[in-house]
Amino acid sequence: MKLKIAVLPGDGIGPEIVAQALEAAKAVCKKFGHELVYREALVGAAAIDAAGNPYPPETHALCMDSDAVLFGAIGSPKYDNDPLAKVRPEQGLLAMRKQLGLYANIRPVTTFPSLIHKSPLRTDLVAGADFMCIRELTGGIYFGRPQGRSEDGETAYDTCVYTVEEIERIIRLAYGYALKRRKKLTVVDKANVLCTSRLWREVAQKLEKEYPEVETEYMFVDNAAMQLIQWPKRFDVMVTENMFGDILTDEASVITGSLGMLPSASIGVHTSVFEPIHGSYPQAAGKDIANPLATILSVALMFEYAFDLQAEAEAVRKAVDASLAEKIVTEDIAAGGKAYKTSEVGKRITDYLY
Ligand code: IPM
Ligand code: MG
């Protein structure tokens, strides 16, 4: 099979981790007899510096022309402390999501036995936790208009907007995953306060009847934040709106021990994007110390979701497990043992795959 992918390394550690993930993808393709064709493009601060636009039209054209996008990370301290900056790297990510119609962000949260001691939670609470957060990605307060400042600058506003159509498609998608898993869906909202949340609940309650095999529960977001750390194993599939999902998935990611381990898939209308859930970690840029595993595991998700290549995805996960078992890991998860370089971890995984 011919796999045509767009590679968007982005900022900070993005180029280093994406390089390793790309090597892993090449190894798998070689082993399974696929042809991998890839082209790189700019996004984020790197694209602002080069082209004045965090998501240039050429980058979008390349994404549209590809079967999948492998994405690194976005963000640079150069822009973080300037509240008046006209253009920000993060706008590139949001523009990409919007223009590719990526309305669903899927973040599977699974534990790695060898990393459980790194979890801030007690082992008995996290061992075996396995759930999936599905975050709506192109609506809500991230994109609602009006958004801005009053003329005198004394007032600022954002608007949260959702349509029935937007809610329905993400809830249906979540039911699809729940059906394939343990058949439990938690719809997270703030229906006791927000109008958009009440619409979410209304739509979900209507759809619930079409999926009698699935147990549906409704939970306020503050309660969900609490339950996630109190008893994460109670969750199977969780679905929520854009900003609640942003916050809850960061919370969920550390439960398993390291933010450096979790991959994500963003899917929707056009080309799907695969990326680690962590950020651009600018302090580590260029030092060859960042953990490449979340990006390598995103390659596994890419094989699975974009190409329906299950054995290939499994091969990547096995290689990651092998490197963990041998403790060939970067400093964030080395736990006092030897810390390997990003490139050394990548090489071990590639060697295992060939
Ligand atoms: C994420 C990130 C982004 C978001 C930022 C970088 C715009 O936090 O993918 O979760 O808020 O969606
Ligand atoms: Mg986030």
Image (tube, rainbow, N blue to C red):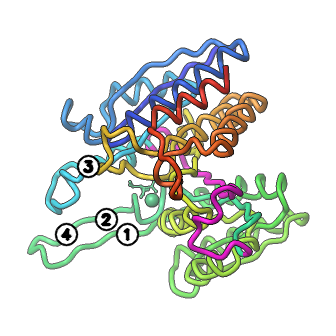
Q: Is residue 153 above or below residue 143?
A: below
Q: Earlier in the sequence, mark 1 or mark 2?
A: 2
For mark 1, give the secondary structure.
loop
What residue appears at the point 36 percent right and 26 percent down from the top-left corner?
Answer: 41
**Alpha carbon distance from label 1 to label 4:** 12 Å
Label 3 with label 4: CB-CB less than 8 Å:
no
Label 4: which residue? 149
Nearer the observer, 42 or 219? 42
Q: Residue furthest front?
A: 337
**Tag on residue 146?**
2
Residue depicted at x 48% and y 38%: 100
Q: Which residues are magenta?
A: 97-124
Instruction: Using the image, determine if residue 209 lies above or below residue 6.
Output: below
* Comparing labels 2 and 4, the label whose residue is closer to the camera: 4
Instruction: Give the image location of residue 155, x and y in percent.
Output: 19, 78
**Circle 2: residue type:** Pro
User: How would you rate the neighbour count of disc 2 (Cα within 10 Å): few for under 14, some for 14-19, many for 20 or more?
Assistant: few
Q: Secondary structure at mark 4?
A: strand
Asked whether mark 2 and ligand 1 are closer than 8 Å, the reply comes as no
Vertical arrangement, residue 281 with respect to residue 309, above or below: below
Tell me: is circle 1 under 8 Å from ligand 1.
Answer: no
- Tell me which label, 3 or 2, sits earlier in the chain: 3
Disc 2, SS:
loop
Q: Residues within 10 Å of mark 3 (few under 14, many from 20)?
A: many
Spot occupied by residue 300 in the image (x, y as percentages of width and height): 65, 36
Could you tell me if the residues under marks 3 and 2 are in contact, i.e. CB atoms within 8 Å? no
Where on the picture, by quarter, is residue 201?
bottom right
Number of marks drawn: 4
Could you tell me which secondary element the residue under label 3 belongs to?
loop
Point out which mark residue 159 bears.
Answer: 1
Indicate which quadrant contains ligand 2.
Answer: bottom left
Mark 3 vs mark 2, CA separation in Å = 27 Å
